[in-house]
Amino acid sequence: QKEVEQNSGPLSVPEGAIASLNCTYSDRGSQSFFWYRQYSGKSPELIMSIYSNGDKEDGRFTAQLNKASQYVSLLIRDSQPSDSATYLCAVNTPPGAGSYQLTFGKGTKLSVIP
Amino acid sequence: DAGVIQSPRHEVTEMGQEVTLRCKPISGHDYLFWYRQTMMRGLELLIYFNNNVPIDDSGMPEDRFSAKMPNASFSTLKIQPSEPRDSAVYFCASRELGVETQYFGPGTRLLVL
């Protein structure tokens, strides 16, 4: 059973602070990792993807991957109230080539306080 | 492109009734996914299609659920008969071959009374 675990939160941070969101996964064969943002009542939208160990930066967002520890994180610098949403971690563990199924965590709710 | 289109956006029905959810994927996308989201279980994959062919339906909860994709631009998810525990948000998503990014539709909020 493939599992993706996230702290459900809520995680509250003041405006301008760094928000740190964490995710662990169970299947060592996992190859691709994604962070989706979901505003209340809306659909998930992709904000970051990461495929190799280390950091990947995109604007105020940094994704970090450590395959040895089976750990993925998302850092949001200079947090804004508009970042308040639920963040879903998703992992792709194809059983064979080309499966491309995503397993999602239940999400961490982030609240940025003005 | 209009993105993934789902209808209806909201559905309220009574237990025992048939429910049909519809999805139009992004043009040119080869894969279509049906998900269900609840507070308790999060976002769960129900079934996905590649080039209109069902590839993995292991997430379909029981025989009351069925999905079809008669052509590249249309898919349905049917629940018959519906039960209160089927109440959830159902999302359709699509992606193109060779690209792992999935694009989600706005979802259908289903309430079974």
Image: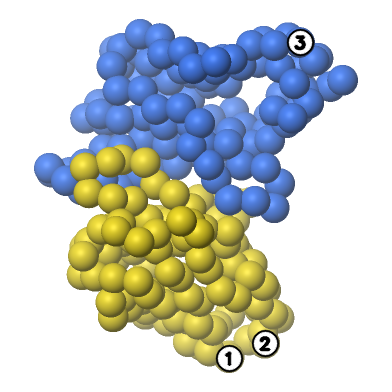
The disc labelled 1 sits on which kind of residue?
Gln
On what subunit does the disc labeled 1 rest? B
On what subunit does the disc labeled 3 rest? A
Q: Quadrant of the C terminus of chain A?
A: top right
Question: Comparing marks 3 and 1, which lies closer to the viewer?
Answer: 3
Name the residue at 58% across, 90% down. B16
For label 3, count other residues whose C-alpha is less than 10 Å away and answer few (under 14), some (14-19) or many (20+): some
On what subunit does the disc labeled 2 rest? B
Residue on which the image places disc 3: A16
In percent of width and height, residue B88 lies at 60, 64
Q: Are marks 1 and 2 in contact (CB under 8 Å)?
A: yes
- Residue B14's tag is 2
Helix, strand or loop status at disc 1? loop
Q: Is residue B92 left or right of residue B16?
A: left
Helix, strand or loop status at disc 3? loop
Residue on which the image places disc 1: B17
For label 2, count other residues whose C-alpha is less than 10 Å away and answer few (under 14), some (14-19) or many (20+): some
